[in-house]
């Protein structure tokens, strides 16, 4: 194991190299571009052996990954924001044709107005496409999660594509020390992809053909839903194996930080959790009983875990770096749907913050903890709006 | 003396659900005869996404990937790369798309694949409208032809998009026009496309749709013969930029003979037909210029 200073995007590129990906389909978009540049360089310098298809759009990037995956190759692409939106249709084809494509998505706001900074509106809009979604908090986690995503996606009990999220610039272009596992360790963790069936001249099969209302359509959708739910256990196994081989402890579907004895907890995704940690540390110094819960896996959604959380804490704040216009923050909506089944559900405060990269600092989060502790909060609140705009 | 040039192999089974007299069905049958069993197909949204039959059945004796409307060339690019990685690089990968999936919604992915010189065969079976959705105009619909979105009073005023020329402009190794009513010429072109082992090869088939063209299904071959005998659909190939007319009518028939069999042209006035004839003659002369020296006359 060696330690290197890597940007989030470089961490993705190194994970793709270590995963021995065979076909990469690439199209540039800020702030993802340095991922596909890193991979191109690795192939050019013979550090990596893969076919590199420089497609003319993100739609084709995903289409080419699906084609290659159906032939039995391990595939990768990366995108962000409008690129992910353009892919939307093919995301359904990837999951529906049960291709374990792995993709990195650099979370970036959608226009208009044009904005290249972080928020989660791009990936949240794709939550119903049948993709596993994992949100990373650090560059180390970016590298580890991409490798784990292949293990989970290619597992015969799952066979669904997976999307690994890192926040624009905060992770993608920020350098952090990353422990690099050795190739032989990763080879043990992630053996070559062996598909259940693949395109082969001797095989006579239609992939993705027509299925009427009384055909198999609905059963195939149920099978995807079952596979998505089964991926919880597969993900835990993968994390556990990864921990044994690399010595880094598993983080779980949800990671808790200083929740012991906490009166209130805040839920966050991605790099916002890093700011919230600082806030928790400050408040704990002052004797305030606050904790942080970081939601790592958003699809499948950990309903059972959220319910358990609701039984332990009376007040939960939820940070949404995204808005579903007319329906508040989608993280809150999903959590509330789990919590509603509790006999005595907790009080929930939904915060919408940090859209389009709007600055959101530990001091801002501390104020929100204050609201939670005082019990003075609205059901939904926009945080950090400029006055008089 | 005639010699059988068309392989006997049948890779299109019975049980397909095409309409009677479907030019696309005959085109697939002939294409697979020429391409052979070591072929994998990519079919986007089009009639063939339905013709191949519903899950879990298929009438195709080759592995087939269905995909989204605009994605055929990109899926085929990825499939070829994947097969190459898996030691199956000799498999012929062919996209088989309609005119909407080629000239309209799929042109971006096709242009990208051709520019990258992907080792695929791209086949457009052109029935000159969106037939699977019920006869709506596409970029490949001829000027003035009736469709449900170009009814009388809202006629299409622009000519058919010239896809073969667009593909020639990509400087790919092989572009050809095909017509299932000229089966020997058709299969010879498929075989040539297969024999060229690198780069994108583009085959553009005029595939009759009796349902949308409004004529009796029994007339499919007759209408197809007239399309080429009138020079409305000339048969040629462009190999590394060099044009060659592959079948030339000894004495061309008037375009009116081709037009009058089809209900979709019933709005045409004599003046319209005269104008279409003029346009066909001009395009033929242009083709002849491109194809000098000319091929032998049949």
Image: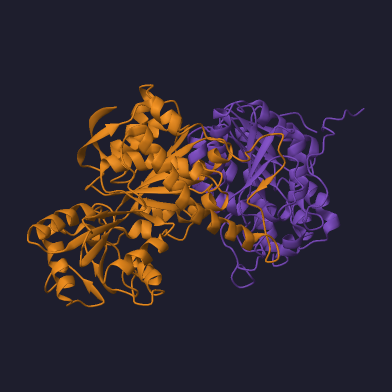
Chain colours: A orange, B purple
Q: Looking at the image, which residue sits at the far left?
A: A286
Q: Is residue B117 left or right of residue B194?
A: left
B96 or B209: which is nearer to us? Answer: B96
Up-down: is A276 above or below B204?
below
Q: Is residue A178 left or right of residue B296?
A: left
Residue in the picture at 61% in, 54% down: B45
Q: Is residue A41 left or right of residue A280?
A: right
Answer whether residue A27 is visible to the viewer in this image: no
Answer whether residue B183 is visible to the viewer in this image: yes
A256 or A109: which is nearer to us? Answer: A256
A255 or A275: which is nearer to us? Answer: A255
Residue in the picture at 12% in, 74% down: A388
Q: Position of residue A90 (x, y in %)?
A: 50, 52
Q: Is residue B170 left or right of residue A207?
A: left
Image quadrant where residue B241 sits? top right
Q: Position of residue A263 (x, y in %)?
A: 20, 67
A168 or A196: which is nearer to us? Answer: A196
Image quadrant where residue B184 sits? top right
Quarter that holds the N terminus of chain B: top right
Up-down: is B73 above or below A326?
above
Residue in the picture at 37% in, 32% down: A245
Residue in the picture at 21% in, 71% down: A382
Image quadrant where residue B228 sits? top right
């Amino acid at each position: 194991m060696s330690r290197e200073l890597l940007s989030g995007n470089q961490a993705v590129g190194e994970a793709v190299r270590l995963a021995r990906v065979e076909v990469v389909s690439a199209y540039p978009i800020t702030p993802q571009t340095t991922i596909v540049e890193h991979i191109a360089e690795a192939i050019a310098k013979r550090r990596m052996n893969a076919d590199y298809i420089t497609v003319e759009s993100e739609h084709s990037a995903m289409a080419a990954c699906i084609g290659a995956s159906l032939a039995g190759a391990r595939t990768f692409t990366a995108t962000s924001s409008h690129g992910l939106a353009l892919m939307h249709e093919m995301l359904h084809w990837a999951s529906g044709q049960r291709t374990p494509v792995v993709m990195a998505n650099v979370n970036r706001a959608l226009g208009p107005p044009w904005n290249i900074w972080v928020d989660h509106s791009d990936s949240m809009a794709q939550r119903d496409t049948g993709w596993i979604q994992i949100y990373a908090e650090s560059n180390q986690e970016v590298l580890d999660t991409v490798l784990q995503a292949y293990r989970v996606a290619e597992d015969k009990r799952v066979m669904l594509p997976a999307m690994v999220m890192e926040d624009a610039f905060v992770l993608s272009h920020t350098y952090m020390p990353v422990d690099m596992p050795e190739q032989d360790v990763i080879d043990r963790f992630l053996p070559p992809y062996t598909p259940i069936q693949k395109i082969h001249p001797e095989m006579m099969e239609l992939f993705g053909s027509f299925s009427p209302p009384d055909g198999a359509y609905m059963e195939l959708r149920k099978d995807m839903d079952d596979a998505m739910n089964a991926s919880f256990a597969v993900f835990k196994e993968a994390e556990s194996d990864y921990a044994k081989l690399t010595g880094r402890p598993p983080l779980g579907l949800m990671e808790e930080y200083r929740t012991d004895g906490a009166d209130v907890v805040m839920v966050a995704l991605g790099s916002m959790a890093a700011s919230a940690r600082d806030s928790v540390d400050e408040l704990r110094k002052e004797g305030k009983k606050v904790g942080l819960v970081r939601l790592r896996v958003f699809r499948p959604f950990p309903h059972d875990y959220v319910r358990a959380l609701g039984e332990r804490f009376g007040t939960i704040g939820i940070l949404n770096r995204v808005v579903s216009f007319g329906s508040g923050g989608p993280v809150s909506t999903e959590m509330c749907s789990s919590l509603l089944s509790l006999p005595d559900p907790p009080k929930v405060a939904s915060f919408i913050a940090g859209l389009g990269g709007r600055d959101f600092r530990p001091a801002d989060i501390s104020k929100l903890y204050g609201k939670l502790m005082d019990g003075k909060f609205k059901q939904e609140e926009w945080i950090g709006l400029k006055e008089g705009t | 003396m005639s010699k059988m040039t068309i392989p006997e192999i049948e890779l299109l089974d019975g049980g397909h659900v095409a309409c009677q007299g479907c030019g696309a069905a005959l085109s697939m049958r002939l294409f697979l005869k020429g391409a052979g069993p070591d072929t994998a197909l990519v079919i986007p949204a089009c009639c063939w996404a339905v013709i191949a039959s519903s899950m879990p059945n298929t009438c195709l004796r080759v592995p087939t990937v269905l995909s989204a409307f605009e994605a055929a060339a990109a899926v085929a690019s990825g499939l070829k790369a994947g097969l190459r990685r898996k030691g199956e690089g000799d498999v012929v990968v062919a996209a088989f798309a309609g005119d909407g999936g080629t000239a309209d919604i799929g042109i971006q992915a096709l242009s990208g694949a051709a520019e990258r010189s992907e080792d695929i065969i791209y086949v457009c079976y052109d029935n000159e409208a969106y037939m699977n959705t019920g006869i709506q105009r596409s970029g490949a619909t001829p000027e003035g032809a009736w469709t449900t979105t170009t009814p009388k009073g809202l006629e299409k005023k622009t000519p058919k998009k010239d896809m073969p020329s667009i593909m020639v402009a990509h400087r790919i190794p092989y572009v050809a026009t095909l017509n299932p009513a000229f089966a020997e010429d058709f299969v010879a072109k498929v075989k040539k496309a297969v024999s060229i082992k690198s780069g994108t090869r583009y085959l553009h088939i005029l595939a009759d749709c009796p349902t949308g063209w409004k004529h009796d299904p029994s007339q499919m071959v007759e209408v197809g013969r007239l399309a080429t005998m009138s020079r409305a659909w000339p048969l040629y190939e462009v190999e590394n930029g060099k044009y060659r007319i592959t079948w030339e009518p000894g004495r061309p028939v008037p375009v009116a003979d081709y037009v009058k069999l089809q209900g979709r042209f019933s709005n045409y006035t004599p003046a319209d037909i005269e104008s279409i004839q003029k346009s066909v003659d001009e395009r033929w002369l242009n083709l002849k210029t491109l194809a000098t020296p000319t091929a032998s006359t049949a």
